[in-house]
Image (cartoon, helix red, strand yellow):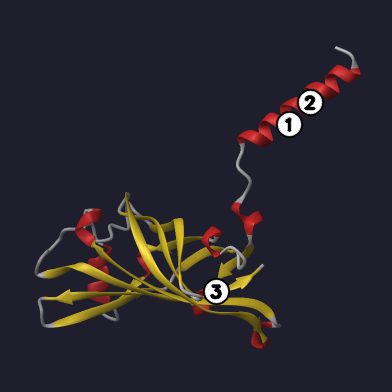
Amino acid sequence: MDDAMKRSFRMTVAALLFSAVPLPSALAGDLYDLDPEHTQTIFHIDHLGYSTVTGSFHQVKGVLTLDEEHPEQSLVEATIEASSVDTGVPTRDEDLRSSQFFDVARHQTITFRTKKVRRRGPRGADLSGELTLLGITRLVTLRTTFNRVAPDPLRGNRMVAGFTASATIRRSDFGMKAFVPLIGDIVRIDINAEAIRR
């Protein structure tokens, strides 16, 4: 095979590779990393009908691909360390880490990845995506409001995006059935987040 044929062969292989591999979603927008100091993932669940127990996760990381011109092409990927659950009561938190609930010995993380974004007004959007909990994946929709995208003078004028989101799930859909219905099956999730552009 002469040099010309070798070059032609390499170009053909390269073209086939690029056509077969999807381009990274980052090319569609700017990449933002969730700021753990300004991100809260909070859950609320009924306790025997007497009250609502509220808890949160302290260890959350994720990436937001934000396309301001075409928001429907934006993407969110987030990972929660299940062992970071905190309701303010250490004994209850240990119960939540046990095999009856989050089973952190076998399932260390909870993940979410958007599959579809539907705009809802100038600042709102419904983010439908895959939530994986206890190894089970279900489609969940986050009702999201984008609060602001602007330089933050307290962070060296780096661009920061802030948003809030909420969703409702049934924990039994993910195999977490302990003490249902005494302890509520329906869980309300509230997210307050800031993300910093890379």
Is 81 above or below relative to 157?
above
Secondary structure beneath label 1: helix
Q: Which residue is mark 3?
A: 35
Q: Which residue is mark 2?
A: 10
Question: Could one spot residue 13 in this view of the protein?
Answer: yes
- What residue is rendered at 16% in x and 83% in y? 51
Question: Disc 1 residue type?
Answer: Ala
Question: Disc 2 residue type?
Answer: Arg
- What residue is rendered at 72% in x and 26% in y? 13
Q: Which residue is mark 1?
A: 14
Disc 2: CA contacts within 10 A as few (<14), some (14-19) or many (>=20): few
Picture coordinates of residue 122, whole percent (x, y): 51, 75
Nearer to us of marks 3 and 2 is: 2
Residue contact at pointers 2 and 1, CB within 8 angstroms: yes
Is 32 above or below relative to 160?
above
Question: Disc 3 residue type?
Answer: Asp
Name the N-terminal-most of marks 3 and 1: 1
Picture coordinates of residue 189, whole percent (x, y): 32, 72
Task: Out of 92 and 118, give the one closest to the viewer.
Answer: 118
On the rendered image, what quadrant is the N terminus found in? top right
Is 85 above or below relative to 18?
below
Nearer to us of marks 3 and 1 is: 1
Task: Out of 45 and 27, give the one closest to the viewer.
Answer: 27
In screen coordinates, is 86 left or right of 175? right
Question: Could one spot residue 193 in this view of the protein?
Answer: no
Is 130 above or below relative to 191?
above
Secondary structure beneath label 2: helix
How far is disc 2 from disc 1 in space, using C-alphas?
6 Å
How far is disc 3 from disc 2 in space, using C-alphas?
43 Å
Picture coordinates of residue 163, whole percent (x, y): 49, 76
